[in-house]
Image: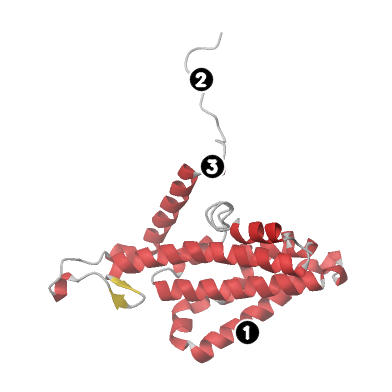
Amino acid sequence: MAGRESLWNALTAPLIRQNPVTLQILGICSALAVTTSLATAFTLSVSLTVVVVLSAGLISLIRRHIPNSIRLIVQIIIIASLVIVIDQILQAWFFALSQRLSVFVSLIATNCIVLGRTESFARSNPPLLSMVDALGSGLGYSLVLTVIGACRELFGSGKLAGVAVLPLADEGGWFTPLSLMLLAPSAFFLLGGLIWAIRSLRPEQAEPPEFPPHETGEAR
């Protein structure tokens, strides 16, 4: 049985210290594509978090009964089945959001975060610890998408979650929406800036230079 400290570390480590997006650079396709608004970013974040938690729990439960030769196939089948369920729920109750998310809900099945947590952690740890670890990874992913989605919607349309926040110039206010924020390049630069800021505050996350700078002066 996992202790409280190990559960707490598994839950909180992926938020900042070991965030799967900013540290491991995983799941960035969705971070670039669906963060045009807070609603779409939040919906995909919740969907991925539910899938990764349930898949980690299921795979951990049957981990001793999965032959090593077909473990990846079993994991992908479980993940894909959960994604289909989530996709059908979104289409049934949140059709407009489902249309805006397009194929990206289905692509959760190929998200490196989901398969990575099931393969590297859930396959060799008990269910509770695996699900808490998966929840932490899902929350870390959600945190990044929520921040980027909020910034893009706020400065791209002057709204947040569909509610007007900044007074628009064409309605007598002072803010002119930055249409560039609703395009994919803006998400790329925002994500890059977020990664730079976190690695500046936490230098231990920075990767060592592949080609160290040469020493000044001639070698003797």
Number of the label disc, if any, that sits on residue 206: 3
Residue 73 figure quarter:
bottom right
Q: Residue at x 67, y 77 (%)?
A: 80
Q: Secondary structure at mark 3?
A: loop
| Label 3 vs 1, first from the N-terminus | 1
Residue 130 % position (x, y): 72, 66
> Tell me, what colour scheme is on the image?
secondary structure
Front residue of 172/110: it is 172
Q: Contact (CB < 8 A) between labels 3 and 1?
A: no
Give the left or right position of residue 217, taking residue 52 as reference: left
Q: CA distance from mark 3 to mark 1?
A: 38 Å
Crowding at mark 3 (Cα within 10 Å: few <14, some 14-19, many 20+): some
Please give the residue where the numbered disc 2 appears in the rendered image. Answer: 215
Q: Contact (CB < 8 A) between labels 3 and 2?
A: no
Please give the residue where the numbered disc 1 appears in the rendered image. Answer: 85
Q: Quick one: which residue is furthest to the left in this view?
A: 172
Q: Nearer the viewer, mark 3 or mark 2?
A: 3
Number of the label disc, if any, that sits on residue 66: none
| Label 3 vs 2, first from the N-terminus | 3
Residue 41 % position (x, y): 46, 71
Quadrant that contains the N terminus: bottom right
Q: What amino acid is labelled 3 in the image? A: Ala
Q: CA distance from mark 3 to mark 2?
A: 21 Å
Q: What amino acid is labelled 2 in the image? A: Glu
Give the left or right position of residue 98, taking residue 175 as reference: right
Q: CA distance from mark 2 to mark 1?
A: 58 Å
Can you see residue 73? Answer: no
Q: Residue at x 19, y 71 (%)?
A: 168
Residue 32 % position (x, y): 45, 63
